[in-house]
Image (cartoon, rainbow, N blue to C red):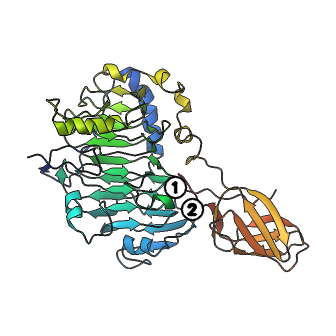
């Protein structure tokens, strides 16, 4: 029987069945590509393996979650709810190994949620979208992990929606924030829209849009394993995804990947060195609104369906359109004005490429070279989550017994840093964490600052990034 059309997201397919093994971790099919491809991809695989284990946490966490009671909180939700919604500092929440059967809603910005180990730290919950809509008292959200704040970082754990129904909406992660980083994680569902980051500026999907730093979302993903059904990775806005594995569980799914880039012609969904697999005849990619795909150095299993990324036209079965179908197609036509934009480079299928896999970057806007297609390029130079350079001191000024140090970007203070002075004394940190300006106090207003002594703590960048960026101790 046809499932009802979901009114808030057009990326759905009217098919649902109970999974025979709803929580089985379906394996990634090993690829046996032609020799001309294997050598290069082997090097890429070695690189991805070397990056598989994230570096140890370089600073002490602000909060620790442990199911056995050995931390500050026993649930993840209690920990993130303790952070004020107007938070301006980078707050690190460390989650010890264990299975946390709960839903989580993160309202604060600048939160890092890091697990002790990728498979040992598990956040899981059974949540179907229809069940969520029926439960009017549920304020946590439609996903297992619901992200409302900007500059959120998730790393080194597993998030799974255990609802177990193939072909119905069952979000694992739903996000409404700008500059979201998800890396070294497993993100699983048997349903649609597993990983849905839907930051928009029109209020339709982000009810508190005016409180965010950007009217549209920017998302960075690295070294993920994502499993799901229809449109199970479906960003709205800008998205860069690298060194990740994607698995389609639904043979009747129209597509696995989906993008909405209709609010700005520069919006892109870039997938680099990603590996795609799924059940026999799995579908690849589609869009309802203007989309802008780049697939660079990707690999596809032989089970892939021979259908290039395409725009959805109703009815989905290609039959005679009803009045409702024609009305819907007309509405979608208003958000499809930039034409076909799906580009490939050095991306190959096991058993032989389809014609639409041929290199086509020369046809993309600006004809970018492969080496140009980076995270920074994806985000039009306005955010570079892979930038390793930390904040630098720009200016220093003195007024009375206070010394003001201004950085190149907002910073977060961990501990009690000192500002060393020319007479070998030190000025004590007073305030400013979460801004670009720190204030230090001194008893000797005539001694000149010489350097920052972190005093066993740290000063780090507040903005979300792929790694913690430490401020330099040098002064101008």
Query: Is 140 located above or below residue 26 in the figure?
Result: below
Q: Position of residue 10 (x, y in %)?
A: 27, 45
**Label pair 2/1, CB-CB below 8 angstroms:** yes
Q: Which mark is residue 58?
A: 2
Most extreme residue toward the left is 1
Q: Which mark is residue 401?
A: none
In this figure, which residue is indicated by the disc labeled 1? 55
Image quarter (top left, top right, bottom left or bottom right) of the C terminus: bottom right
Local packing at callout 1 (Cα closer than 10 Å; few below 14, some 14-19, many 20+) is: few
**Percent position of residue 102, x then y:** 30, 68
Secondary structure category for the residue under label 2? loop
At 70% from the left and 55% from the top, the residue drawn is 408
Q: Is residue 307 visible?
A: yes
**What's the residue at 59%, 61% (across, down)?**
462
Give the camera-side residue of 209 and 456. Answer: 209
Q: Nearer the viewer, residue 165 or 223?
A: 165
Residue 273 vs residue 405, the one in the foreground:
405
Left or right of residue 355: residue 466:
right
- The Cα–Cα distance between marks 2 and 1, rounded to whole angstroms, is 8 Å
All told, the count of numbered labels is 2
Residue 112: % across, % down: 49, 62
Q: Residues within 10 Å of mark 2 (few under 14, many from 20)?
A: few
Give the SS element for disc 1: loop
* Residue at 62% from the left image edge and 49% from the top image edge: 388
Q: Is residue 251 visible?
A: no
Residue 424 position by quadrant: bottom right
Please state if 301 lies on the left or on the right of 384 as rendered: left
Which of 179 and 156 lies nearest the eye of the viewer?
Answer: 179
Q: Position of residue 18 (x, y in %)?
A: 12, 52
């Amino acid at each position: 029987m046809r499932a009802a059309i979901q009114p808030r997201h057009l990326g759905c397919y009217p098919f649902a069945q109970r999974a025979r093994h709803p929580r089985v971790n379906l394996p990634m099919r090993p690829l046996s590509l032609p020799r001309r491809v294997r050598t290069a991809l082997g090097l890429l695989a070695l690189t991805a393996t070397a990056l598989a284990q994230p570096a140890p946490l370089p600073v002490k966490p602000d909060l620790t979650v442990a199911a056995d009671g050995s931390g500050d909180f026993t649930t993840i939700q209690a920990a993130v709810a303790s952070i004020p919604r107007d938070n301006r500092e980078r707050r690190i929440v460390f989650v010890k190994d264990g299975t946390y059967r709960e839903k989580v809603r993160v309202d604060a910005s600048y939160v890092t949620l890091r697990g002790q180990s990728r498979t040992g730290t598990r956040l899981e919950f059974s949540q179907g979208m229809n069940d969520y809509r029926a439960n009017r008292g549920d304020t946590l959200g439609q996903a297992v992990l619901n992200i409302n704040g900007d500059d959120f970082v998730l790393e080194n754990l597993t998030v799974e929606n255990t609802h177990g129904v193939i072909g119905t909406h069952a979000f694992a992660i739903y996000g409404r924030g700008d500059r979201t980083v998800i890396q070294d994680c497993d993100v699983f569902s048997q349903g649609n829209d597993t990983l849905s980051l839907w930051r928009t500026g029109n209020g339709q999907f982000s009810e508190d849009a005016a409180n965010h730093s950007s009217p549209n979302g920017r998302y960075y993903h690295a070294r993920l394993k994502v499993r799901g059904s229809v449109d199970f990775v479906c960003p709205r806005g800008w998205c860069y995804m690298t060194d990740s594995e994607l698995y389609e569980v639904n043979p009747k799914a129209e597509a696995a990947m989906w993008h909405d880039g209709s609010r700005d012609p520069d919006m892109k969904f870039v997938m680099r060195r990603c590996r795609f697999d799924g059940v026999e005849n799995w579908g690849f990619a589609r869009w309802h609104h203007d989309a802008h795909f780049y697939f660079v150095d990707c690999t596809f299993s032989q089970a892939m369906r021979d259908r290039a990324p395409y725009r959805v036209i109703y009815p989905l079965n290609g039959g005679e359109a009803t009045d409702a179908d024609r009305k819907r197609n007309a509405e979608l036509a208003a958000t499809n004005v930039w034409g076909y934009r799906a580009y490939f480079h050095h991306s190959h299928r096991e058993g032989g490429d389809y014609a639409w896999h041929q290199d086509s970057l020369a046809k993309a806007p600006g004809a970018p070279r492969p080496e140009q297609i980076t995270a920074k390029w994806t985000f039009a130079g306005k955010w570079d989550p892979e930038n390793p350079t930390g904040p630098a001191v720009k200016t220093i000024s003195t007024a009375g017994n206070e010394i003001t140090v201004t950085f190149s970007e907002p910073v977060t203070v961990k501990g009690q840093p000192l500002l060393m002075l020319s007479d070998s004394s030190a000025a004590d940190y007073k305030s400013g964490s979460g801004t670009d300006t720190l204030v230090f106090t001194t008893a000797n207003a005539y001694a000149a600052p010489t350097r920052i002594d972190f005093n066993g703590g740290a000063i780090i960048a507040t903005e979300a990034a792929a790694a913690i960026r430490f401020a330099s101790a040098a002064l101008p």
